[in-house]
Image (cartoon, helix red, strand yellow):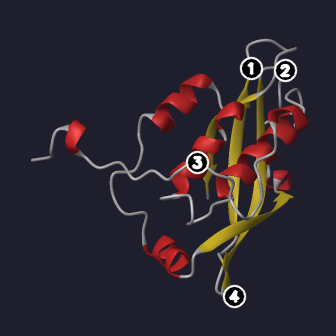
Amino acid sequence: MSPPPSTVPVLTGRPGTPAGGAPPAPSSVDGRDAVAVSRAVVAITYTMDTAIDASGWDAAMRAAPYLAPEYFATLRDNPPDRSPGGEWFTWQAHQAYTTVELTSADETGKPEDTPFRAFHAWNVTVTATGRDGWTERSPDQVVYVILGRSDAAADWKVTDIQVR
């Protein structure tokens, strides 16, 4: 039997700027450019710092300005209630933060963008750097970003992210 939701501990970090880089300010990202928005969200989501973050969920919360309200609500309302896992524990042991390298993976094939839906893929390379000098590069991943908007003149918002 699970404990009532109010007694489940929520693993969340504290406010701050990750050592691997400040999230891009919404004013610095062209919201009408689906590629720019998808790139910003992926960069923010994979830039983590064990000094301020309890898990990758905290990084995802920093992407809020670029997320569709429904998608953000789903993420916000489902914080982790258990340990983030072995890789995170290694990072914590080294007091690590991550930096991210992104290259377009759109050549892997994607649906054609429309004025209201866009699809972009990114090859993501994450390097964790410990404050003790340790470094580790995570295996590359391809991250697929789906964006939407209700008006062709509106800013793009991310409606889903899938990792393969």
User: Element under label 1?
Assistant: loop
* Quarter of the rendering occupied by the C terminus: bottom right
Q: Which residue is mark 1?
A: 149
Q: Name the amino acid type tagged 3.
A: Pro
* Mark nearer the N terminus (4 vs 2): 2
Q: CA distance from mark 4 to mark 2?
A: 46 Å
Q: Position of residue 58 (x, y in %)?
A: 55, 50
Q: Name the amino acid type tagged 1.
A: Arg
- Callouts 4 and 2 close, C-beta under 8 Å: no
Q: Name the amino acid type tagged 2.
A: Pro
Residue at 42% across / 34% down in the picture?
77
Q: CA distance from mark 2 to mark 3?
A: 36 Å
Q: Nearer the viewer, mark 2 or mark 3?
A: 3
Q: Which residue is mark 3?
A: 15
Q: Position of residue 83 (x, y in %)?
A: 37, 63
* Mark nearer the N terminus (3 vs 1): 3
Using the image, determine if residue 158 lies above or below residue 161: above
Residue at 39% across / 50% down in the picture?
80
